[in-house]
Image: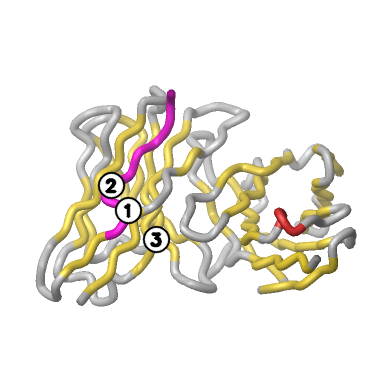
Amino acid sequence: QQQVKQSPQSLIVQKGGISIINCAYENTAFDYFPWYQQFPGKGPALLIAIRPDVSEKKEGRFTISFNKSAKQFSLHIMDSQPGDSATYFCAARVDSWGKLQFGAGTQVVVTP
Amino acid sequence: DGGITQSPKYLFRKEGQNVTLSCEQNLNHDAMYWYRQDPGQGLRLIYYSQIVNDFQKGDIAEGYSVSREKKESFPLTVTSAQKNPTAFYLCASSLSGEDTEAFFGQGTRLTVV
């Protein structure tokens, strides 16, 4: 059973466009929601993260929107660039030690 | 410089053999994790350890074993009991606390031949 559901599985966006990835969860005990970016053959790297008491967090072209009542959160990539082509994972922290539950991932392709 | 080192990058195993994947970190993190990554399934937790000489099963521990004799090291053994071991294996570590970030190694790709 997947505790964090992520969609879409893949998306293609033109350079300069907006990429939107959505995640939903059930466990209200999750207390920290990071997004990871992974390039082929590499380990994931933290992109941006948010706590459930914040509705939005922006870092450069990347924005997380968080809806606590709906138990949903999303990643927006503004002005998408070819270098953003990667797989993106949402995650939710299970405990204070950092154990994470991951979504299934979204492969993003940005066309020139 | 600090980080997590996984070795080898590629590993080939014959059916019926046990193999051990190495994970070393010099970040002074207490917690370490092993995840398995398969296409379309995200990362699934195999084992994790929060202190030396203690570790817990994750969601898919069957066919795997670990040890944590040193804070810096958390090796994973893929045993012959693991029916479908071909996958990309990722090791991670983290500190405890509010702003915990899990740092990942570069992964080991295991292929059964």
Q: Of label 1 and label 3, which has the lower sequence position?
A: 1
Q: Nearer the viewer, mark 3 or mark 2?
A: 2
**Is B8 in the magenta?**
yes
Residue A37 coordinates in the image, percent (x, y): 62, 52
Identify the chain of the residue marked 3, using the numbered disc in the image.
Answer: B
Q: Residues within 10 Å of mark 1 (few under 14, many from 20)?
A: some
In this view, the mark in front (1 or 3): 1
Magenta span of residues:
B1-10
Whether the residues at callouts 1 and 3 have beta carbons within 8 Å, the answer is no
Image disc number at residue B9: 1
Q: Are the residues at dot 1 and dot 2 in contact (C-beta closer than 8 Å)?
A: yes
Q: Which residue is mark 2?
A: B7
Neighbor class of circle 2 (other Cα within 10 Å; few <14, some 14-19, many 20+) is some
Please check the rendered image and state whether residue B91 is part of the magenta-colored stretch, yes or no: no
Percent from the top left, x then y, of residue A8? 72, 72
* Up/down of B44 relative to B97, above or below: below
Name which residue lies at 23% across and 73% down: B112
Query: Which residue is the site of mark 3?
Result: B36
Q: Secondary structure at mark 2?
A: strand
